[in-house]
Image: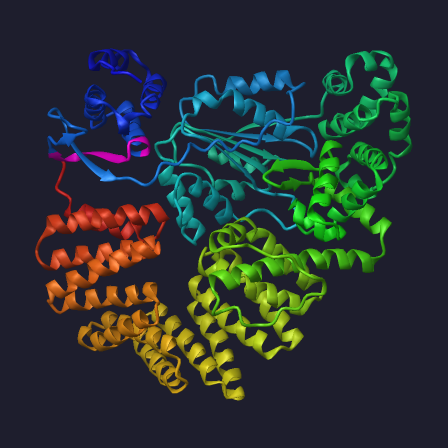
Amino acid sequence: MGPLAIDAVEAVVAGADACERAELAGLLGWLPQARRSDRELAAALLERAVGEGEFADRLRRWIAEHAGATVTANTISGGQMFGTVVQARSVQLHTAPAVRPTPRQLPPPAGPFIGRRAELAELALLAAEPAARQLVVVSGPAGVGKTALVLEWLRELSPRYPDGQLYADLRGHAPGGPAEVGETLGAFLRAFGVDRVPDAPAEAAALWRSVTSERRIAVMLDNALTAAQVRQLLPGSAAGLVVVVSRNRLTGLGVDGAVFRPLGLLDEDAAAEILLHRVGRRRAAEEPEAVREVVAHCGGLALAVSLVAARVAARPRLTLAATAAALEQESGRLAVLRLEGELAVQSALDASCAALAPGPDRLYHRLGLLPFSDFTAADAAALTGDEPPEAELLLDALAEANLVEDLGTDRFRFHDLVRLHAQARARAAEPSSQREAALRRVLERYLACATAAERLLTPNHATLRRDYLAPQADGPADERAALRWLDQERRHLLEAVRTASANGWFALTWQLVDAMFPLFLRLRAHELGAEANRLGLAAARREGDPAGLARMLTDGGGRLRNLGEADESIVWYQEALHLARADGDLKAQAQALHGIGKAHRLAGRLDEAVDCFRQDLELRLAVGYQRGAALTRVTLGDVALAQGRPQLALPELTSAYETLLALAEPYEAARALAFLGQARTVLGEYEAAEQALAQAAEMFRTAGSRNWEARALELRGELEEAREAPQRALLRYEASLSLYQEVGAPDVQRLTGKVCRLAPPES
């Protein structure tokens, strides 16, 4: 783009409304590589960005996201900006995180939107002139077309919400129960660049409100079950839109200012329009009476109409009259759907399956065995025993018949009612032994992939046996792929644990929990931990494997501690300690004592923690476990600092740092070094403290540990305060706060208080 004149831009800015001004900022993606004249334009925009009002707020946010800087209006006056001095206002620039694309998460349309034009127009009136955040609930029976209607509406509204459109399936009627609030909040926060989400749902919800407080976004919450499930997902924006889609009315959201739009059955004209579009108007015109009969049998459900239309469209020789007769004859099957009062769906699904070839038909009913409603081609291959390419072809056939939904990226989904239909067909088509064997193959596939990830990410942990009844393919190929797979499949892994437990496959249950270890350690999926812990422990007791039982107790104790349940964690560790003493296993005894000590440290019982760590250290030294002994010394140093005894911390931390460095454990060595810097600050050894903390921060940066890098910067801020250098301390705290905000750490509140305490008052 060529040079732009500042006065021309100012003229546009002066006459633009808020949306137009945001669009103006959006045109400047070339800013970081701008020429001299364009840099002058950048300076003019920065000058406006430090003012007050909506446009200034938008420019500040845009500059942070697209120009790699954050602008505030409360510090030094003047400054060099892209080669130009800004005199009118004061600005401050900080390095910003990498730019992420604006989230546009709405699922793609399955085809042209047909029918429901009146309802669409009614929804459009709601967003004509929104003065504040709107909350709209669209409810109705399953299969009526709620999701398709809302998606069409939100696509039309896309320009109104320049900061993004987000989508979440809350799985209100899914087999594994509704989605956890933390899971949905985590996905939303990661879409806006928060890499590490707080474990506690309340903290995650607060961070979500903070992140969205100045953004104009639209959020679609599909398949909601209760008002409570929705409430913590509401963003903090004062000018956004939240649309909730549910089979239930969710009248409890009335206290939150919700507007309710119930969606009834399709009228005959709309249903006929869908049918005519899919099968062709010329073909339908030849059988007008049959068209009316088919529509009547579908009962006004968009799902039923679409399935019947797909079946007819795929068979040029099949008449609509024959289809209508088939629907009428089959309308009494699948009594389970009678609970929903939707016999038309039963008829449509039976008719669609009757037209399937043997391979797709077998896969269809076996997919009903899965404990989750979305799945991959690898899951399908495990169910049928086919190779993945063949399973993909079978899935394509089912997607073509509208029996499964292709979500892209090798993932498919059942509609809830379709899944019930597939389950019934599975029970009718195969004996229980064949159904169990197919399901077991799927669960073992998850065990094999999780174990492969465990070996890549936590090799010291991958020591226990694995039992497979069928050969397993390779899992993730490298650490990045392993983390990605664990993140994507975290919910499916928990469902696999539940299913294995329910089927009495006890060894498989605890082995699945054991293989999930890096999911809790590296991805902090603590929201899954409580249930997985208990199922794994119960299964290990039933199966009777001593090593499995000990592992469930120690790993489970650690997860309980991370969930804040220090006392319950101690109970689990004490049982592990008792078992280890009975077996004479000194290393296992040390591990249990270490866990008990960390739980006491969390609860503030420092003397009890020291006693446990001293016993732990003695045992680890006795068995020659150098790495473990060094980690115990780190915890002893941490507790000594908490007790106000830095002199006792120095020898422990120095020894730990030297040992871990020699063992090529840079991350753990950096932790010891950070505590060393803290101890030397307290002792007044400022130069040594600065050297230790600077080196620790760099080691954390190299290791990719943003949370501990932020902690090292915070400790450097405390060092500057001890030196009576408040301005330097403020800079350290601001840098630390920025990193904590990036990873969604709960430390944000503490650092915000430190920054506010040292920041000069606004003039």
| Residue 104 relative to residue 401: left or right | left
The image quadrant that residue 680 belongs to is: bottom left
| Residue 90 relative to residue 578: left or right | left
Please state which of residues 27 and 681 is positioned toward the viewer in this rendering. 27
Residue 281 rendering spot, x and y as whole percentages: 78, 13
The image quadrant that residue 21 belongs to is: top left
Residue 638 rendering spot, x and y as whole percentages: 28, 70
Residue 154 rendering spot, x and y as whole percentages: 53, 25
* Region of the chain picked out in magenta, as a range: 65-76
Above or below, 107 relative to 556: above
What residue do we see at 20% from left, 58% from top? Answer: 694
Quarter of the image that includes the C terminus? top left
The colour mode here is rainbow
What residue do we see at 76% from left, 51% from top? Answer: 384
The image quadrant that residue 717 belongs to is: bottom left
| Residue 207 relative to residue 80: left or right | right
Residue 430 rendering spot, x and y as whole percentages: 85, 53
What residue do we see at 8% from left, 56% from top? Answer: 724
Residue 639 can be seen in this image: no
Above or below, 531 relative to 355: below
Please state which of residues 485 and 679 is positioned toward the viewer in this rendering. 485
Above or below, 641 relative to 220: below
Residue 598 can be seen in this image: yes
Above or below, 201 relative to 358: below
